[in-house]
Image: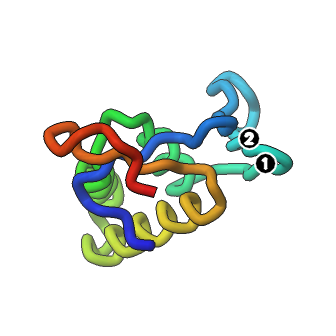
Amino acid sequence: MTPELKSRPRLAMGCRLNEKSQPSRVLHMPERALRLNGPSLEIVERCDGTRTVQEIVSDLQKVYSQAESRKVETDILAYLALLHDQRALDFLSDPAGGSADTK
């Protein structure tokens, strides 16, 4: 499943990112947890349901401007798809097209 660029990723019900004040950032999911750092953390922090996949990609292409922009996009899309497959993320449709989940 490849995320649509206009969809808006957000953490799925039952998933949460621990507080920034903690020594390491962890994505808590039902029956498991995933320690995040670097790019994976930057991606998940932006999955707030307000930004589109395209906005996340564009933002991180600026952050990682030393890397090839197409590679950054491919890696982000693959990571979002992985998190969706693990039921950690939901994708909301573009508000202009309704707010239904595009699972």
Contact, CB < 8 Å: mark 1 with mark 2? yes
The x, y position of residue 9, in whole percent, is 41, 47
Q: Which kind of residue does numbered mark 1 sit on?
A: Ala
Left or right for 68, reference 20: left
> Where residue 28 is drawn, which disc sits there?
2
- Residue plotted at (51% across, 46% down): 44
For the point 39% across and 36% down, the residue is 49
Could you tell whether 38 is left or right of 55 in the image?
right
Name of the residue lying farthest toward the left: 96
Spot occupied by residue 45 in the image (x, y as percentages of width and height): 49, 39
Of 69 and 96, the residue lying toward us: 96
Disc 1 marks which residue?
33
C-alpha distance separating marks 1 and 2: 5 Å
Asked where in the image residue 22 lies, by quadrant, the reply is: top right
In screen coordinates, is 15 left or right of 6?
Answer: right
Q: Secondary structure at mark 2?
A: strand
Tag 1's secondary structure?
Answer: strand
